[in-house]
Amino acid sequence: MESLNATSAAGVLLDLCGVLMLLGAFACLGSKLFNRYVVYYGLQSVVLSAATGVVAFHFARIELWVLCVLTLLIKGIAIPTATRRLLIALELKRDVAVSTGLSTALILGGGLTAFAYLVIRPDLLPHGVVASAVVPLSTAIVLLGALEMVLRRHTIAQLIGWLIVENGVFLGAITLVATFPFIVEAGIFLDLVAGVLIMVVFVSGLTRELAHANASELRELRG
């Protein structure tokens, strides 16, 4: 089977998708509006679906096309739509539970991105393989999503941060396991989606009772 080289058309498109997803994570980190959180996550998920489609087209794998469609429907449409309706129901617009300023958050995000490239150096990975560029990008997206969860104290914002982490993990997964059996790909996808759906249900129920809850307030409930 032909390898997915960084110099091939598919490799360039996959790299571009990774860069766009990273920019989406930065955009989310640099905003305080709940609606923009959802929009940026939705756009990032659509790009992730496109990246899956690129890999599916390159390897001509029907199972990857299935993952592409499911990613678009669940992560690109269903989750953003449900979250947006929740925001409307709770009348949430601006996130005021932020631990630091936006400039500081973006600087920290830039530092974590540089850290991802220092730890996972592309030159240490197989030369010419597209994973050598995508893996550092996906790692940076995971770190930015985790930073979002740390700096944002509102439960909805932390949920978006978790979803960004999941997108980063999935981007790395479709790059690294494209040659694995379908059961591996489907297992990773379904496990991640199950975790996301459980968190959505949990946070939805929680925020209906505590519309403006944040992490510091929830800690006061401990005995």
Image (cartoon, helix red, strand yellow):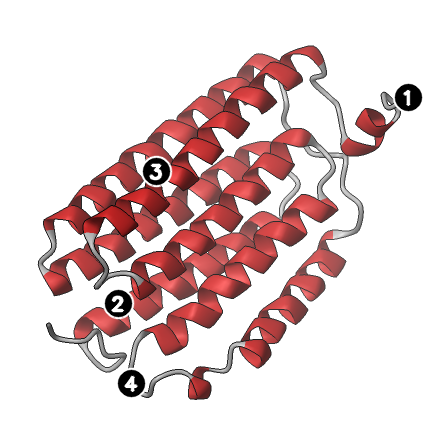
Q: Is residue 116 above or below residue 223?
A: below
Tag 3 or tag 1, which sits nearer the N-term? 3
Q: Are marks 1 and 4 in contact (CB under 8 Å)?
A: no
Q: Which residue was labeled with disc 2?
A: 13
Cα–Cα gap, marks 2 and 4? 14 Å
Q: Are marks 2 and 3 in contact (CB under 8 Å)?
A: no
Q: Quadrant of residue 12?
A: bottom left
Q: Secondary structure at mark 1?
A: loop
Q: Is residue 130 above or below residue 46?
A: below
Q: Nearer the viewer, residue 71 or 37?
A: 71
- Tell me the mark number nearer the camera, choosing from 1 and 4: 1
Q: Are marks 1 and 3 in contact (CB under 8 Å)?
A: no
Tag 4 or tag 1, which sits nearer the N-term? 4
Residue 223 bears which disc, if any? 1
Q: Is residue 33 visible?
A: no
- Tell me the mark number nearer the camera, choosing from 2 and 3: 3
- Tell me the mark number nearer the camera, choosing from 4 and 3: 3
Residue 166, how many percent across, how many down? 47, 47
Q: Amino acid at mark 1?
A: Gly
Q: Quadrant of residue 57?
A: bottom left
Looking at the rendering, in which quadrant would you find the N terminus?
Answer: bottom left
Number of other residues with Cα within 10 Å of mark 2, as a class: few under 14, some 14 to 19, many 20 or more = some
Horizontal side, residue 125 vs residue 32: left or right: left
Q: Amino acid at mark 4?
A: Gly
Q: Which residue was labeled with disc 3?
A: 190
Cα–Cα gap, marks 1 and 4? 56 Å
Tag 3 or tag 4, which sits nearer the N-term? 4
Q: Which residue was labeled with disc 4?
A: 128
Q: Secondary structure at mark 4?
A: loop
Residue 37, how many percent across, how many down? 55, 39
